[in-house]
Amino acid sequence: MNYKSANEYYRSLFGQKIYRLALDAGCTCPNRDGTLGYGGCIFCSGSGSGEFAADRDLPVRKQLVQAKEKVAAKCGPGKYIAYFQNFSNTYGDEEELKQKYEDAISDPQVVGISIATRPDAISEKMYGILEELAQKTYVWVELGLQTIHEKTAAWMRRGYPLPVFDEAVRRLSALSGHLSVIVHVIMDLPGENEKMMLETIEYLNALPIHGIKIANLNILRDTDLTLEYEKSPFPLMTMEQYIELLEKIVRHLRPDIVIYRMTGDGAKRTLIAPLWIGNKRMVRNSIDRSFREHDVIQGSAYSSR
Ligand code: SF4
C-alpha cells in the first residue's frame, strides 16, 4: 500500500519541493487569555506550541525575509508556504490579521498560507476573510483536535466539545476557493488505548478534511503536563510501539488524506519525555525502515519537513 505525503502533494500542486516558513501573527489563544482559561491545553508551552516561529515583535514581511534566509542557507532558494503556527492565528482583530495574511502572501516566492487555529476561534468575519484569501492563494487551515474522546479532551483542557470541531470543518470545507482543512491529532494520550486512537482516525475519515498531522504525546518543559508527569509519571510508548501504531493508522486512514507529520516536533532542548523522539534522524530512519519492511510504503515516509 502507499499513502500521500505532504511532499508528494506539494510536488503534484507546485511541481517542486516547498518549504514552510514559521511566522508569528502575534496572537494569543482563548484558552490562555482568560476567555476560556489561563493555563492553556495541558501540553502547551508558553510559546503556544510553536517553538520555531519567527520573532513576533517584527512585522510579518520582516519575519518572512528572515525565515527565507534561514531556509535558503540550508536548502537553497525555493518556494514557500507562510505558516502561522503558534497560538490561535484567527483569534484577534480580524482586519489586523487580514493585513498580516496579505503581507505574507504578497511575497512572490510564497505560494500559499497555512493558518493554525482552534475551531472555536473563527469568527463570522474571519470565515469571510479566509474565503477571500482562498480566492487569491492556497489556504490551509489547521485545526487542533487531538482526540475525539471527550474525557481525554477534558483532561487536556482543550476547552471545546467535539461538535464545535465538526461545525468548523463543515463551514471551512464549504467555503469557495482553494481552502483545505488539516487536522492535528495526538496519540498516546493518557487513558487512551489503541482502539480509541484508531477511533479518532476513523472519525476523521468520515469528514471532508484534506490532511492530518499526527504526533505522539511530547512532554515539554514549562508545561503543566510536565508538572503532572513529574509528580506521578505515566508510561509513554516506546519508539517501536509508536511505529507499530503509526502503521495501523496509515492502514486505517482514508487514502486521499495527506499526512503532513508523523511525530511531535517540540524543540529538543525543551523535551522531557519520551527522550527517543529527540533523535529525529533515528526516528525517521526507523519509521522508513519499518514501513518498507511491512509494505506500508515503497518510498520514503519522510519528505515533508
Ligand atoms: S489551543 Fe493551542 S495555543 Fe491554545 S492553549 Fe491549546 S495548544 Fe496552546
Image (tube, grey):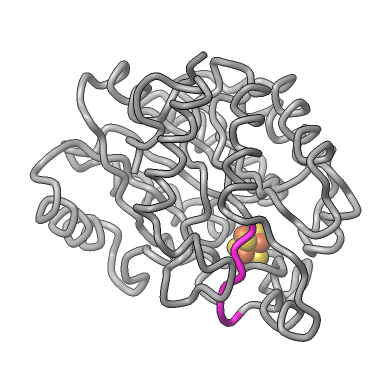
Place of residue 249 in the rendered image (x, y in percent of width and height, measured from the top left) = 65, 31
What secondary structure prevails in the magenta region? loop
Q: Position of residue 86 (x, y in %)?
A: 49, 61
Position of residue 137 relative to residue 197, above or below, is: above
The furthest residue to the front: 293
* 284 within the magenta span: no
Q: In the current view of this chain or complex, which residue is farthest to the right?
A: 151
Instruction: Between residue 285 and residue 82, name the one nearer to us.
Output: 285
Residue at image position (66%, 51%) is: 121
Given residues 136 and 253, the one toward you in this image is 253
Q: How many marks?
A: 0
Name the side, left or right, on which 153 lies relative to 108. Answer: right
Left or right position of 90 against 108:
right
> Residue at the spot x=65%, y=44% of the render?
185
Q: Is residue 29 visible?
A: no
Q: Residue 115, how many percent across, how many down?
A: 48, 45
* Rendered location of residue 14, percent (x, y): 25, 21
Range of magenta residues = 217-222
Q: Is residue 204 visible?
A: yes
Question: Please, is residue 136 above or below residue 34 in the view?
Answer: above
Q: Is residue 19 left or right of residue 135?
A: left
| Identity of the residue drawn at 91% across and 54% down | 151
Split into quadrants, the picture shows ligand 1 in the one at bottom right
Nearer to the camera, 50 or 88: 50
Q: Is residue 120 left or right of residue 73?
A: right
Please, is residue 81 above or below residue 32 in the view?
Answer: above
Quadrant showing the C terminus? top left
Q: Tell me the residue at 43%/41% (across/down).
A: 114
